[in-house]
Structures are given as C-alpha cells and as structure tokens.
Image (tube, helix red, strand yellow):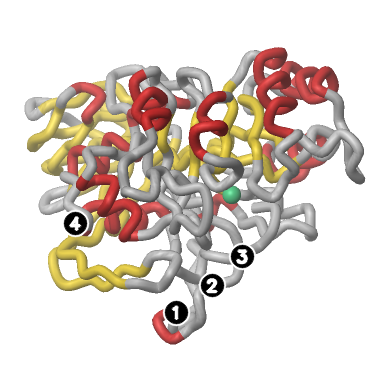
Amino acid sequence: MDWDILIKGGDVIDPSQGLHGKANVGILGEKISAVGPSVDGDAQVVIDARDKIVTAGFVDLHTHNYTSNSKLPSLDADSTSLANGATTVLDAGTATPSEFPHYWETDLSEAKTRIYALIRMPMPYGPDPATVEQAAAVIKQYEDVLICMKYHHSQHYVTLPLAREASDFGGGILMAEAYGAPIPQLLDYMNPGDIVTHTFHASFRYPLWDHRGEVWPAVWDAVDRGVVLDIGHGARGFSWRTMEHALNKGLRPSTISTDLHAGNVDGPTYDMPTTMSKMLALGLSLDEVVEMSTSIPAKALRQQDFIGTLKPDAQADVVVSDLLEGEYKYLDVLHETRIGKQRIVPHTVIFGGQMYDGPRYEPIDMSHQHDAPPGFIEGT
Ligand SMILES: [Zn+2]
C-alpha cells in the first residue's frame, strides 16, 4: 500500500507553496507525504476530489471552547470547528490564569481539535486576580498549547499594560480587541506578530480611521511592522461597511477568524467556512481567502511548518470542500446583507491523518434578518 489516504483529482490550493492546480495528495500516518499531479498508487482510502477544492485544514485564530465552565458561552470545538474544517483553533482568552489548569484537564486535553489558547489578564484587584508573574508562570507551564495573553474590551484599560508585561515574561503573543481602547494607543502596545482581533468591527467606538475616514497612521505603522489584523467576526466584530471602507483605502485583513461562541454560532457567524465565504463576497480572491485561513494564521501561531500547509512532513490536516456557485445571502453583525456568488462547504475533513466522522453542530434558525441587532455577551 503506497498511501493511507489518497485525495485524487482535486483543485489543490496551498498558498504556502504557491500551489493552485489539479493535483493529488498522498497521506501516510499523520503526515502529508506527497502532493502533485503525478502522485498516485494504492491507498487504504481514496477520496474522489474531482470538482472540489483541497486545502490545508483551516486555522481559526479566535474561538471560545471552555465548555466545562458554565459561566462562559463556550462551544464544543469538535462539532463546531473541526466538523467545519477548522482543524486548529486558538481559544482567545476564555480562561483566566487560575482557571487554565481546569480548562486544560476538562476541555483542551479531551478535544480532537488542535486547540491553542490565550489566557485573559484579570484585573489586579478583581474577583480572580493574578499578578504578571503568576500569569507568566502559567504560560510557561503550559507552553505547548498556551501561547499567551488576551486583552478584552470589557476589561479595565489597566489590564492592557499588565497583559503586555505578562506576554513579555511568558515569551508569547498578545491579542487585543480593536474596540478595547482607542486604536492608536492600543497599537502602541502591539509588537510584530501580535494580533488585533475584531479589526473590522462596526465602529461603535474606536474606529480604524479619523473623522475624515482616513486610516490612522498608527494602523499603517502596525501593518508595516507585522502586527496581524484579524477578523474575529463574532457577535459584533465584523461589519461589511467597515471592511468595504478599509478595502477601498487599501487596508486588508491578515487573517480570517470567527470568534465563535454560543452567542453567534446560530448566526450571524455560524462557522469558519461561512466567514471565509463572506470574504469572497467582498471580492477577496479564493487564493487570498485560503491563505488568510491557513498559512498566515499558522504563522501567527508560529506553527507554519506543522499546520496550515500541504508541504510534505506537515501534519495531515486537509479539507476537501465544494465551492458552490449561486446566490447566497450573508449577514454581518448589524444584520446588513450582501449577496455572494460562492459558498465554501467542507465535504471531508482530515485531521492528523484521521477522517473526522463525529457530530456536526446544526445551527438553529434564528431568522436574524428580522431581529434587532444582536446582543453582546460581556467577556467574550
Ligand atoms: Zn472572543
């Protein structure tokens, strides 16, 4: 037997190698073994990918998966992320430093989905306090999965410099919400490789531009030094009009992510492929959308040779998707709509060389177009 799994005849899109064309993918064990038009032979499982696109597993840089803590609106990662092609996710600070060991034992170590995590820097005098040193110690103890700190909009501004300090001590990245502080001041705290999420939010406060609509110079500076501008769709993190204005100004997202939690999984976010399809509706190319959902977020996690790529020896996380053509109505967080001509629908999800055959969460129809703008859940 040449391969454990052979994916044949698909349109392979792997921006990490500049690949876009008909090719086959051979998988042995948990690794990608070979990719190319002439890769062929016997296999335990042959997947017919004709008329389908084949990409690396999606890497979603913003989810909430602490399901064993009932105070938080978290989701089971396997049925909401992995089942929809997001083989790797980053839990964006659902747990505090003191909660993290419990989160690890009950959720992270149990999930099939590859989950990396951030912890939230708590208020120094709040109900669940932590010092910079305590936070940094937890980061170091769980360094394989815990890649650093998150600063939330709902936290007092005092936690931003503390989160920065803990990130520096812990040796990881800082993620901050774009509506957590005025953008130029917020970006002052962000180093190369740090992540701004909810970047294209509905500008309720702290917009990306001044009153004339000109992008703050601090935003361009951040782009130049390699700060990652992430989507983080969520219940109020993504607006068509903000993104359209940004694109008109030449400002583009670095990465596509969902901020999936219980408050938006039934709309308007739904899942990673829907969020990716919305970016196609905005005119980003399929190659850009795949790159923003695979190799660029993998690099943000500093795992670009391991995930987000179909290079030989990378982890065999692969998604075979239909790219449907039609008229699809998509919603943003304000329930404004845009019609897209394409829709990405995962058909087969492979993670670490295993076919995913577990449950997939079915969203409840919320008829969002008739709702008031969605509520917002503090702390997410
Ligand atoms: Zn969030």
Badge 4 is on which residue?
323
Choose between 256 and 178: the one closer to the eye.
178
Q: Residue at x 38, y 59 (%)?
A: 239
Badge 1 is on which residue?
368
Mark earlier in primary sequence (4, 3):
4
Mark earlier in primary sequence (4, 2):
4
Residue type at the position of mark 2 = Pro
Q: Residue at x 71, y 19 (%)?
A: 165
Q: Are marks 1 and 4 in contact (CB under 8 Å)?
A: no
Residue type at the position of mark 4 = Leu
Distance between mark 2 and mark 1 Cα atoms: 8 Å
Badge 2 is on which residue?
374
Q: Are marks 2 and 1 in contact (CB under 8 Å)?
A: yes
Residue 233: x %, y % from top left: 45, 54
- Between disc 1 and disc 4, the foreground one is 1
Identify the image quadrant of residue 210.
top left
Distance between mark 1 and mark 4 Cα atoms: 24 Å
Residue 376 is labelled as 3
Does residue 338 show up?
Answer: yes
